[in-house]
Amino acid sequence: MKYTLLIILVFTSSFAFAQKVMIYGGENHDVYLGCLTCTQFHDESVWNENGVYGTKNNNLSIWSEFSEYGNEFSYLSPWNEYATHPPILVDEDGGYYGYFTRNTDFKDRTEVEFFVYVLNNYRWINEHFEEFLKGLIL
């Protein structure tokens, strides 16, 4: 798994540097949930454990199992395989990257390889956050 992770991260790192891709949740996609391609040192990054969007203790964090955006049973969560209102991914220029959801049947689900990797491996990432961050090249 570790080698696969590094290959994917190296492949996607040039994309990640070029675009700030943000997650918006809620039924109307008007709730900012952080930056998916920002480094772990960026205040808005979902990879910043000390930030609002990267901590497991905030209701706006996709990593908080107690929030409607991080609970795998919430219809608003990217981790719900049957989500009906998953978050969307957009960049600062209004570029659209699809829905950020594990629901593989959802129309317009993101196809960006790094985002799909995160969706498919979110449990491992959440349990091994520090290890994942060591290999993350954004």
Image: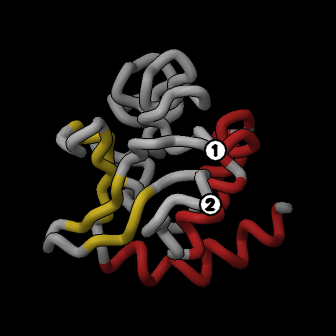
**SS for dot 1:** loop
Residue at position x 50%, y 77% from top?
Answer: 13
**SS for dot 2:** loop
Q: Are marks 1 and 2 in contact (CB under 8 Å)?
A: yes
Q: Position of residue 40 (x, y in %)?
A: 44, 49
Q: Nearer the viewer, residue 131 or 80?
A: 80
| Residue assigned mark 2 | 104
Q: Which one is earlier in the sequence, the residue at label 1 or at label 2?
A: 1
Q: Is 88 above or below relative to 125?
A: below
Residue at position x 43%, y 31% from top?
Answer: 69
Q: Label 2 amino acid?
A: Thr
Q: Determine which quarter of the picture holds residue 116.
A: bottom right
Q: Is 14 above or below relative to 115?
A: below
Q: Nearer the viewer, residue 10 or 107?
A: 107
Q: Position of residue 119 (x, y in %)?
A: 61, 54
Residue at position x 73%, y 34% from top?
Answer: 127
Question: Which residue reaches farthest left?
Answer: 93
Apparent side of residue 74 relative to residue 19 in the rendered image (left or right): right
Q: Label 1 amino acid?
A: Glu
| Residue assigned mark 1 | 81
Classify the position of the N terminus by image quarter: bottom right
